[in-house]
Image: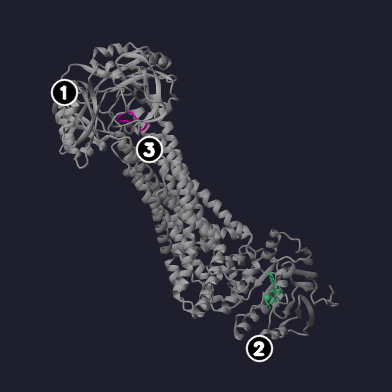
Amino acid sequence: MTRDALEIRLPRSTQTLFRARGLTKVYGMGETEVRALAGVDLDLAEGELVVLLGPSGSGKTTLLNNLGGLDVPTSGELSYRGMDLTSADEAQLTRYRRDSVGFIFQFYNLIPSLTALENVALITEIARDPMPAEQALEMMHLGGRLDHFPAQLSGGEQQRVAIARAIAKRPEVLLCDEPTGALDIRTGIVVLEAIERANRELGTLTVLITHNAAMADMADRVLYFSDGRVHREHRNASRAPANSLNW
Amino acid sequence: MISLLNRKLWRDLRRMKGQAIAVSLVMACGLAMMIMARSLIHSLKSTQLEYYESNRFADIFVQVRRTPNSMTTRVAQIPGVAVVQASVSVQITLDVPGLDEPASGLMRSLPDQGMPELNRLFLREGRWLGPGARGEVLVGEAFANANRLKPGDSIAILLNGRRLNFRIAGIVLSPEFVFESRPGSALPDNRSYGIFWMPYSELAAAFDMDGAFNFLALTISPGAVERSVTAALDRLLAPHGGRSSFGRSDHPSHVRVTDEIRVLQILSIGFPLVFLSVAAFMTNAVLSRLVALQREQIAILKAFGFSNSEIASHYMKFALVIVVGGTLFGGVGGVFLGRQLVGMYHMFFRFPELAFRFDYSALVLAIFVSTGAAILGVFSAIRRAANLPPAEAMRPEPPANYRPAFVERTGIGHLLSHSFRIAIRNLERKPMQAFFTVSGLALATGILIVPNCFRDGVEHVLGFQWDVVQRQDMSIGLIEPDSLKASYALRQLPGAISVEPFRNTMVRIHFGHTHRQLGIQGLPANGRHSRVIDSNSHQVSLPAEGLIVSSKLADVLGARVGDALVVEVLEGKRPIRTIPLVGLSEDFAGIAAYMDMQAVNRLLGEGDVISGASFSVNNARRSEFLTALKTLPRIGWVVVKESLRANFKQTTAASINLLQTLYLILATIVAFGVVYNNARISLAERARELATLRVIGFSRREVGAVLVTELVILSLIAVPLGMLIGTGFATFILQAVNTETVRLPLVLTASNYAFAALTVTIASTLSALVVLRLLNHLNLVGALKAPE
Ligand SMILES: Nc1ncnc2c1ncn2[C@@H]1O[C@H](COP(=O)(O)OP(=O)(O)OP(=O)(O)O)[C@@H](O)[C@H]1O
Ligand SMILES: [Mg+2]
């Protein structure tokens, strides 16, 4: 395996949260073997907003799942604040997800039988240092929708509830996998603004997967992924506000 | 293309095999019960019929006093009479090795030469009586087995007061004694009551019956009317005390078998129906789920040009595979259970061969019924699939609509936990699914109540009979009524603490158009041994005049207190009197009538006589008492309470245990199956939701709680409901089996309910645990991809 001689430049902030070295994930065996991650070297620091771009099947989601403790790598190193995620057990991973990670998915994944407020409160009740559920929804401009069930909300509103649910626990990491994939451009921008705001106001390390190159402008750093590796990295001199994006 | 559809069918089945099996098993329970019951009915009925035919069971029976044999020719001339057979039939007591108390029984004569024409015996073991041989008897199988008697063993029999030793030549069966029990006794008591046969000449000589008979059995020719034959027979034999001829429908052994068949008939309809409706719903739930999952596939199939009926038949096949599975399991299970129960019947009913006979019509019926249930079950799901417009189906199912549950709208919502809220909202959104899960669990609870209710009822009856009604330790009956002085002799028996004489007499009681033949028990007015008890469990003091009968008898006759009953005495001077009904008594076996002993003696006009006495015996001198009793002449029968009690316990306990095991298995399968099915469907429908909870930081345990809360709520509703249903079942069955020979009171105990609740809870918990284990394999990453 050749490792790209990629210089890892430290971001502005001080502390490195994730450290990955030679991170490899292989699905299947023998003939059907798929190398979803083929040796990723990566450091992610506190407060960064990182956009992950790359062709379909290049391993972006796999990386995100590994970072979020949903999946364990086949080989290589991966640590979060010095905690080895590759050898963590089920209970440790649950605790890690509960306290430190916020997830946002393309399909919102709200609990259909709970209202907006309850979907958020679900987390604030178990997290270590949450903000009030109402406040999280307020941040997402959903103060008037607290008692609506998911079926009574638009796609964009549902996604903002999902973001509120993710940030209400004041996570250190926010992992977003194509959060605007199912939304039109205007709604998409509203959602991006929400993510940007969470990143800025809470200082949350945010990793955002997208197929939309236009979104790269809002990042501190852009990682170009292909064939299971970080192929190229680009640092923006300044972040463009989400509402200035267009596609 | 069709074969591809079939391949899809197999894949779907494999994916849902757990649920398909669960449904099949519940269906199988219903079918097994039906096949079992119907096959038992078939086995009993056909065995009975064949036995009766091959061994020429008589149609009409009559006990008379000593009557010259010449009378048989006159009987044979009665129009409609085909074959007449006379014999001697007497009560005996005997001394069996290994049995403390004297046993009693019935001795019948056999022709000195050749086989009897009617009521032919079946030789199970040993040999027939040798021609001209003396000192040999044949013994009924039930008694022989209970006392471990073998051909060649010897027993001492008191024949008309003379104690003689007999060798057992053979062990036999008789169509007259399929149910071998003491007259009037509901349960067999084979250790201390038996049936015996010996040659006519020897028996007649012992009882001074040479050239005479005292028992007639006869068959009627085809087309003859039984009632007119018995009427003519009664007229003819009246001078000989023969006014009491009866047909098969009053024959104790025949009635018992017939009653049993009736109970089976009730079982073969009621229970399977309930099981199958639960199975039908489960099929519906599984299929609805499948159709919902396959919206897009259905749309694509339709877009390809498959017709609605092709799609409907595709899903119908899915249901039919379940039916085939259920029928197979049910058939095998029914045969297995049937074989077990046949073994139990063998304990009560003596047939030359009571083999399990499979009722093929039951299988056909089973297939019909289960297919019907499945079709009913899948109908709505299939219609939904067929009605789906292709374009509509292409779109993913719209997000489910929820609203705050009823409990929350009452204003206590804020008190509820999230998992509780998720649970109740889900339940409210799918009320039918919840309803059937509750029904299934309730049913499982209910059927567990039934056998324990039987057990408690039997225990109650035995306790009532032997602790409240009959407080004596033993009773003896004299061969012939004797003067009151005889009771002074009885008082001298070693160890007798108290003695109470009684005077029983056979009568026929008429009221309106109905009549019943039974013994009136003439007792001391305020006896401390055999007591007459009313429905409030108080002892009734027998009035100087008037009759007290069991409420069942009053029921059967349609008489009420105050009515005048016509009592026709069937012995002695045979008086016929009108006697007022002055009270009702409570009892649970047979029918009974009581009078003051002196009133009976006045009625009979034979002076102060007794027909037997009851004793309480000093326990330390019990064996001394029994030994002395064995030497007493003129004793017709002996009943020892303790051994009756022990025997009853053995036989009923064994059969109730078997029933209990059977119901336990069925209930466990249903509870397990229903919970499994429900949990699997919830798990499948909500995999995405549950995975999301895991992803956002819930532990396995917490996610499991969301799933389990729902089941707990359902069980909390189902179990009490099941107790109600079980009480209903028990009430219904007990009412249905309430016959003149046996009836059980409805006794419901806390331990019965607790056992049912506990069993169902354990079965559901285990089943839920099996499903919860699947949560460990929940695909977290997969759930985050696009919705299925
Ligand atoms: N559970 C799995 N089993 C086998 N192969 C998998 C699995 N999950 C992902 N893969 C494979 O791993 C590779 C990377 O998949 P991944 O989902 O990470 O790609 P992606 O970059 O997120 O693509 P997209 O932009 O389309 O979402 C793909 O080739 C995919 O087929
Ligand atoms: Mg992806």
Instruction: Point out residue B348 in the picture as x, y percentages from the top left corner.
Output: 39, 35
Q: Answer yes or no: is residue B329 visible.
A: yes
Location of residue B752 (image quadrant): top left
Mainly helix, strand or loop, the magenta region?
Answer: loop
Q: CA distance from mark 1 to mark 3?
A: 37 Å
Is tag 1's residue or tag 3's residue first in the polypeptide sequence?
A: 3
Give the letter of the chain under mark 2: A
Kind of residue sitting beneath label 3: Gly
How much space separates mark 2 and mark 3, taking CA atoms? Answer: 82 Å
Q: Which element type, helix, strand or loop, lies under badge 2?
A: loop
Would residue B151 appear left or right of B485 to someone viewing this image? right
Residue B324 left/right relative to A158: left
Mark 2 and mark 3 in contact? Answer it, CB < 8 Å. Answer: no
Report the residue at 27% width, 14% height from top. B487
The magenta stretch is B181-189
Residue linked to disc 2: A247
Structural crowding at the residue carrying mark 2, measured as other residues with C-alpha within 10 Å and reported as few (<14), some (14–19) or many (≥20): few
Q: Is residue B730 visible?
A: no
Please name the amino acid that badge 2 sits on. Answer: Trp
In the picture, the disc for residue B603 is 1
Contact between marks 2 and 1 (CB within 8 A): the answer is no
Residue B744, picture quadrant: top left
